[in-house]
Image: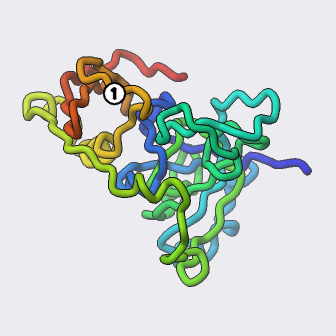
């Protein structure tokens, strides 16, 4: 079976570290889906404006899959506990495919790229390939009483985020809600819990540095990056 890329996603995340683990916990996280030229068809989007959310099927482009491993070590379980790959959302899987339910803000015509989709709920790196989109159907896709395995015990794990006013003023107001969502869900691997360690990741054109002690995450640095460093 041949799978064909239909486009790619522009997001705020240039590295895997710092990108939300799930789009549903970063509802303010923006993305633009840009179609490859072959698929820039207004007709292909007819009726999509009547939906509030879409499924985006995309690829873990930075996951280097070499041979099949039946188990993986989910970061949220501390990095030492192994689970079956098909019981996780690990990017290291036979076809490195991902799917995200995203809010469709609008369909917009642009001179450079034709019709694009403005989305919210991005949890993928900038430039990630897209293979398909499908409308989200609440009556069939939402299962409120679903059992969520080992992830259920992590559902309420939220950090208290502190961003000093003098550092918050260095950031565009538009990305602050997104940043807070990322940080409160703790981007660190669970097996690293060293209070004095400073972590850093790139968000848009800024490097964010933070420390975590107990359940409080404190931003300790914000630096404007020079140039556009693509990964």
Residue at image point 54% right, 22% down: 231
**Vertical placement of residue 21 versus 66, above or below:** below
Instruction: Report the residue at 34% width, 27% height from top.
Output: 193
Residue 160 location, quadrant: top left
Residue 214 x/y as whole percent: 22, 35
Q: x and y percent of residue 224 in the render? A: 28, 21
Task: Determine the residue positioned at 66% across, 31% down.
Answer: 63
Q: Is residue 40 above or below residue 53?
A: above
Q: On screen, 180 above or below 163?
A: below
> Image quarter for residue 46?
bottom right
Q: How many marks?
A: 1
Left or right of 213 in this view: 108: right
Name the residue at the left extreme: 165
Q: Residue furthest bottom?
A: 139
Q: Nearer the viewer, residue 37 or 4?
A: 4
Q: Could you tell me if residue 55 is visible in this image?
A: yes
Residue 231, placed above or below residue 42:
above
Residue 174, visible in the rendered structure: no
Which quarter of the picture shows residue 192? top left
Residue that appears at 24% across and 26% down? 211
Going by the image, does 203 lie left or right of 109?
left
| Neighbours of disc 1 within 10 Å: few (<14), some (14-19), many (20+) | some
Query: Which residue sits furthest top?
Result: 226
Nearer to me, 22 or 37 = 22
Q: How is the image coloured?
A: rainbow
Q: As drawn, which residue projects farthest toward the front?
A: 81
Which residue lies under the disc numbered 1?
193
User: Could you tell me residue 6's position as x and y percent?
Assistant: 71, 50
User: Can you give x and y, in whole percent of width and height, for residue 230 in the image?
Assistant: 52, 23
Secondary element under disc 1, as helix, strand or loop, is loop
**Towards the viewer: 106 or 28:** 28
């Amino acid at each position: 079976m041949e799978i064909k890329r239909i486009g790619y996603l522009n997001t705020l995340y240039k590295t895997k570290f710092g990108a939300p683990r799930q789009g549903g916990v970063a509802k303010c996280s923006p993305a633009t889906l840009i179609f490859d030229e072959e698929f820039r068809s207004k007709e292909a989007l007819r009726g999509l404006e009547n939906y509030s959310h879409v499924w985006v099927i995309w690829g873990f482009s930075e996951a280097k899959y070499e041979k099949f491993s039946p188990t993986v070590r989910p970061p949220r379980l501390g990095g030492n506990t192994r689970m079956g790959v098909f019981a996780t959302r690990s990017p290291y899987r036979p076809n490195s495919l991902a799917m995200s339910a995203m809010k469709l803000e609008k369909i917009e015509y642009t001179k450079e790229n034709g019709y694009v989709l403005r989305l919210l709920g991005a949890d993928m790196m900038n430039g990630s390939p897209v293979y398909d989109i499908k409308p989200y159907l609440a009556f069939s896709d939402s299962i409120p009483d679903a059992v969520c395995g080992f992830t259920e015990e992590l559902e309420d794990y939220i950090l208290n985020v502190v961003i000093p006013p003098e550092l918050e003023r260095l950031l565009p107001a538009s990305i602050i809600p997104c940043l807070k969502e990322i940080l409160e869900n703790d981007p660190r691997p669970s097996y690293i819990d060293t209070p004095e360690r400073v972590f850093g990741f790139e968000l848009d054109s800024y490097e964010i540095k933070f420390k975590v002690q107990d359940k409080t995450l404190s931003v300790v640095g914000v630096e404007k990056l020079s140039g556009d460093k693509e990964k």
